Amino acid sequence: MAGKKVKQATTKRSSSNAANGQSSNDFGSSDSFALSPVTITPFSVDMFQQATPHNDDPNQPVTMRAVVHIRPESIWASLAKYRNFNIRDQTYSVHQYAIISRFQPLPKPLGPLDADIHVNCIARILEIRAFDPQNVYVRVYWLYQPQEIPGGRQSYHGNNELIATNHMEIVDALRVNQRIDVVHWKEDEQLKVPETGLYWRQTYHFLTKEVSTPKPHCTCHQPTNPERSTIQCTNPHCSILLHDHCIIDSALTKLHNQYDETQQSQTAAPQPPLSKKQTSKINTEHYKVQVIDSQRPHHAGRKRLLFTDLWENRLWETDIECLKCGTRIR
């Protein structure tokens, strides 16, 4: 089969791979395999940071490019290339994403969003090659979870967010656990993250340890967490995306300043400026502020601020003003 271009491979192994002497022709067709440390593949990947980019994925950012050497190079180059392969009744193709086990044989398959980083990892399939249908190898790019990159998980990282990397390896196809969908969230083109489960927007360079910066929003110039609420300014000349918590903090600051002005009109002693800690104290002990969908006549369905005076048990609503241009958001 070496040197011959084929369409599809089916990964099967003889009974010598089964635990406890049990026979199985299709790996993973039963739960009879014992968990053991991952088998080392006959191929290794050396990555180098150089100015000359490789042409493996021309769509990736220039900052993610690296020179890659696969060893033994002559053997890898002589193997037949495949567009896809079958294992456990699933077909995997180049450029698809998959959950790949750190162990071989596999532990029991997990749910799509239950990938434990100590047991399973998510990767993008780049290339499929094989000695024969029984010995198939997959070249992949790993996707990291936010806690695995320098700086760790940030407040803007969603629960379903991954980090795309150029960390490349070649794995045995038998480690492929199940297919999974991962979407590239392009913030310049899409205001909201696609509702398809897992997604990535940041990149991590495996060699330089450089992490790309998500698009900043709001007057705080911080990224958004797609699983938290935001409001967009309705002024077409502004259109800034605002964090709910920044809107609430601003409302509390104004409320405190109004109280401060009242106090200063009654005493000559100057009042100290409001700190974040004081803002939090006012919010929890005296006032509660929420962004709501108003149900009041003439405002039904509009985003507004609901104030609750916890001491006097009063409620009132106000319009939301853009923190940048001051426009009342409709």
Image (cartoon, rainbow, N blue to C red):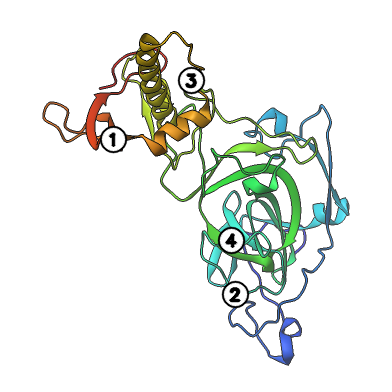
How far apart are labels 4 and 2 at the CA level?
Answer: 12 Å
The answer to whether residue 293 is above or below residue 107 is above
The amino acid type found where label 4 is placed reads Ala
Expressed as whole percent of the image width and height from the top left, the position of residue 313 reads 24, 38
**Earlier sequence position, callout 1 versus callout 2:** 2
Q: Quadrant of residue 66?
A: top right
Residue at position x 29%, y 34% from top? 309
- Label 1 or label 3, whichever lies nearer to me, is 1
Residue at position x 68%, y 66% from top? 175
How far apart are labels 1 and 3 at the CA level?
Answer: 25 Å
Of residues 209 and 80, which is closer to you in this image? 209
Residue hosting label 4: 115
- As helix, strand or loop, the secondary structure at mark 4 comes to loop
**Earlier sequence position, callout 2 versus callout 3:** 2
Marker disc for residue 219: 3
Q: Quadrant of residue 290?
A: top left
How far apart are labels 1 and 2 at the CA level?
Answer: 51 Å
